């Protein structure tokens, strides 16, 4: 997919406290849809899905006092475009001590786009255990799915053109919270 | 990323660290129920072994299989090599069969370098003569890092038959690249000149032991010795063998390594080899993770 040039115009969609409010809302939705988030594990997809998963767990704990185990799930080795690009460094895969067997796993990622990362995550998950069900939470859904995949929890829907790209920054990785739409603006 | 791994000198500090970090992620796999990753599905790895080997060949085979590659094992015995086929003709055969990587062990130093000119795929040196064994050096570095937490500034003594040891040569190159200080210890007849420039040299094991974080014992390779390099096995063992009193001279945290196969009672006492400070079994387990990392990084991308 064509990437916009580095000097392309960009627009901030969410910043700072707006992003926190979106995370709060997803946390509430998870509590509502899972009847209190018991028997649930949050697995973040590196890089930015992992801090988002930790934030969701912290908010869920703040709202209802439930401790939701958090882990990370690296999908690099399961990607379908592994061979099309230079070798990538691996991220961390760490399951919570209780594992995932028989639990509800909620995958957490920053942007939902083609759906290929999620497919890779589902493949990775099946080698790690057998959850009772799998759900997907994303901060941003930018459309343009190439696979029959949808999210259960969406922070913000951002209609985009294919020529645009969406960049999510989180404080833990990038030093600030921000969602930016790059390119495409005349 | 580099295309071949022929020598530990092919690796700069950044690439070597990437391999060790990748190996750490691969190691997590061994605790899983499904010990398989799809990264090299449809790729072919040929194990081309002209010399006997147990652990290295099995280790490479396990590594390739855990990454879902197809593995073809070739050993010189029972192949056309015994009918006189040259390395080049064998290489062209492998090329025609579409090998994506060739893992080669050969008694001639430099064989992997020659092979890399004849095949299109990646070449991984699994030990060539008395020259190099880079994946062994990587797994040794990985073991040191996981036991002691760092490599930079680490004091490593490599003891024994350095002259015939490809393990020692690759370790000196890799460890110095990663910031460790290496001291070669052995009888003067068994310390080669060329790599001693990168390391310190001592002929007195007892003086070096208290100053070492890692003591790596090497096997005395009698099969490669055409001359008498020391008066007797007994004398060698007295001066350069690691026994219990010598183990006690080492710092509390220091570890004992050996690339195997060991001559118990010769360069290492059985009590030392089986002590909790010995990492010999760990080294074998780490070998699979490190070789997975190497194969993935060489073959995984475009």
Image (spheres, rainbow, N blue to C red):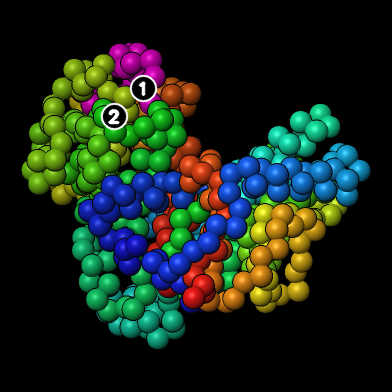
Q: Do callouts 1 and 2 point to residues on the same chain?
A: yes
Residue under label 2, please give it.
Answer: B154
Looking at the image, residue B210 lies above or below residue A130 = above
Quarter of the C terminus of chain B within the rendering: bottom left
Q: Position of residue B104 (x, y in %)?
A: 35, 65
- The residue nearer to you, when weighing B266 against A159, is A159
A181 sits to left or right of B173: right
x, y percent for residue A103: 83, 46
Residue drawn at point x = 80 percent, y = 33 percent: A63
Q: Tell me the distance, in whole angstroms, between the alpha carbons under discs 1 and 2.
A: 10 Å
Above/below status of B184 relative to B297: above
Helix, strand or loop at disc 2? loop
Q: Is residue B166 visible?
A: yes
Q: Is residue A170 above or below residue B125?
A: above
Location of residue A16 by image quarter? top right
Q: Secondary structure at mark 1?
A: loop
**Total marks in image:** 2
Is B254 a magenta residue?
yes
Q: Chain of mark 1?
A: B
In the image, residue B189 lies at what x, y percent?
10, 37
Give the camera-side residue of A46 and B281: A46
Q: Residue furthest right?
A: A35
Check disc 1 and report the residue beneath it. Answer: B254
Badge 2: chain ID:
B
The residue at the point 18 percent across, 17 percent down is B207
Q: Is residue B229 visible?
A: no
Which badge, 1 or 2, comes first in the chain's sequence? Answer: 2
Nearer mark to the viewer, of 1 and 2: 2
Which span of residues is magenta-colored?
B237-255
Question: Quadrant of the rendered structure where residue B185 is?
Answer: top left
Nearer to us in this view, B263 or B284: B284
Q: In the image, B284: left or right of A98?
A: left
């Amino acid at each position: 997919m064509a990437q916009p040039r580095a000097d392309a115009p960009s627009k901030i969609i969410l910043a700072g406290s707006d992003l926190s409010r979106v995370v709060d809302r997803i946390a509430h939705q998870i509590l509502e849809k899972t009847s209190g988030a018991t028997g649930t594990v949050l697995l973040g997809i590196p890089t930015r899905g992992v801090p988002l998963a930790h934030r969701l767990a912290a908010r869920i704990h703040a709202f209802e006092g439930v401790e939701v185990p958090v882990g990370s799930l690296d999908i690099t080795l399961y990607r379908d475009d592994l061979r099309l690009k230079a070798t990538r460094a691996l991220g961390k895969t760490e399951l919570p001590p209780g594992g995932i067997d028989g639990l509800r796993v909620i995958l957490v990622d920053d942007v939902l786009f083609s759906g290929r990362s999620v497919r890779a995550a589902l493949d990775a998950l099946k080698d790690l255990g057998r959850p009772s069900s799998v759900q997907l939470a994303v901060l941003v859904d930018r459309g343009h799915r190439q696979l029959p995949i949808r999210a259960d929890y969406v922070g913000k829907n951002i209609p985009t053109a294919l020529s645009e790209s969406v960049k999510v920054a989180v404080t833990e990785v990038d030093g600030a919270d921000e969602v930016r739409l790059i390119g495409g603006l005349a | 990323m580099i295309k071949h791994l022929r020598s530990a000198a092919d690796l700069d500090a950044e690439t070597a660290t990437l391999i060790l970090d990748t190996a750490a992620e691969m190691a997590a796999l061994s605790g899983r129920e499904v010990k398989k990753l799809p990264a090299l599905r449809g790729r072919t790895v040929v194990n081309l072994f002209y010399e006997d080997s147990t652990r290295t060949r099995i280790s490479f085979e396990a590594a390739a299989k855990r990454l879902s590659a197809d593995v073809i094992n070739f050993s010189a015995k029972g192949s056309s090599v015994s009918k006189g086929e040259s390395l080049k003709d064998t290489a062209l055969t492998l090329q025609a069969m579409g090998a994506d990587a060739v893992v080669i062990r050969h008694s001639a130093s430099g064989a992997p370098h020659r092979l890399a000119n004849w095949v299109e795929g990646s070449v991984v040196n699994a030990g060539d003569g008395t020259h190099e064994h880079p994946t062994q050096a990587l797994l040794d570095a990985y073991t040191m890092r996981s036991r002691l937490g760092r490599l930079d500034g680490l004091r490593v003594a490599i003891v024994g038959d350095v002259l015939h040891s490809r393990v020692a040569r690759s370790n000196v190159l890799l460890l110095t690249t990663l910031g460790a200080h290496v001291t070669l210890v052995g009888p003067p007849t068994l310390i080669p000149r060329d790599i001693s420039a990168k390391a310190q040299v001592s002929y007195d094991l007892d003086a070096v032991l208290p100053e070492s974080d890692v003591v790596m014992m090497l096997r005395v390779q009698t099969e490669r010795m055409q001359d008498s390099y020391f008066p007797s096995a007994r004398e060698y063992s007295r001066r350069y063998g690691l026994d219990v009193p010598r183990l006690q001279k080492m710092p509390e945290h220091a570890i004992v390594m050996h690339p195997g196969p060991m001559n118990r009672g010769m360069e290492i006492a059985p009590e030392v080899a089986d002590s909790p400070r010995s990492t010999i079994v760990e080294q074998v387990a780490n070998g699979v993770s490190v070789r997975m990392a190497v194969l993935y990084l060489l073959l995984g991308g475009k």
